[in-house]
Image: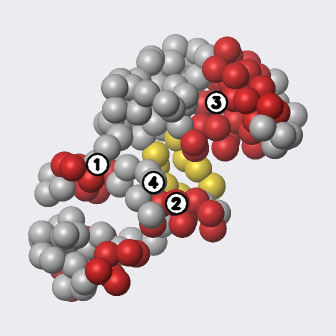
Amino acid sequence: MNTCVTCGRELHPERAKKYDYCMSRECQEKNARPLTMVAVGVNKAAEQYMILDERTQEELASGKYHDQRRGLFGTSPASSPSPAPAPAKAPRAAGKARPRPAARTPARPPWSRSQEKLALLYNEQGLRPDEIAAKLGLSRYVVTQIILGARGRGKL
Ligand SMILES: [Zn+2]
């Protein structure tokens, strides 16, 4: 059963497909902010912003990314699978990507989809792997893996 992240009320199944909060005025005001840029907590060293294209919006709507608002209210721990602490203002240490706790997602590579998207975008723009690594707070090795992986899948 889906419930409102703010007040915990039950959500109509149709509404729950698109929203995780109910229609009460208070919850609308708390949750319905315009989402032009979305902070994705992927790395402690760098705050990642991704360009919100249509596909990303769908992914967000389908809950592919951890919704940080959920964590604030703690009403649905079971539906918050990704360990995404709010990125602290840490000194930017390029290449010092800490391995994330991967116990629940063993099949996934140690980078996020948003990092991969950005890395490939920067790569298309002609940035070198070490420049991309610095921007994303990843190691150059990981960036190279992302690019080679995409090439292997025929995406580049
Ligand atoms: Zn509500």
What is the crowding at mark 2: few (fewer than 14 residues within 10 Å), some, or many (at least 20)? few
Image height of 154 relative to 16, above or below: above
Assess whether mark 4 and mark 2 are in contact (beta carbons under 8 angstroms). yes
Q: Amino acid at mark 4?
A: Lys
Q: In which quarter of the view is residue 134 placed?
A: top right
Q: Which residue is mark 4?
A: 64
Q: Amino acid at mark 3?
A: Lys
Q: Is residue 106 left or right of residue 140?
A: left
Q: Looking at the image, is mark 1 or mark 3 earlier in the sequence?
A: 1
Residue at mark 3 to residue at mark 2: CA–CA distance: 23 Å
Q: Which residue is mark 3?
A: 135
Assess whether mark 2 and mark 1 are in contact (beta carbons under 8 angstroms). no
Q: Residue at x 25, y 83 (%)?
A: 12
- Towards the viewer: 51 or 67: 67
Residue at mark 1 to residue at mark 2: CA–CA distance: 15 Å
Residue at mark 3 to residue at mark 4: CA–CA distance: 23 Å
Q: Is residue 114 left or right of residue 32?
A: right
Pinpoint residue 4: horizontal percent, then vertical percent: 20, 71
What is the crowding at mark 3: few (fewer than 14 residues within 10 Å), some, or many (at least 20)? some
Q: Which mark is residue 42?
A: none
Q: Amino acid at mark 1?
A: Ser
Q: Which residue is mark 1?
A: 80
- Dot 1 lies on which element? loop
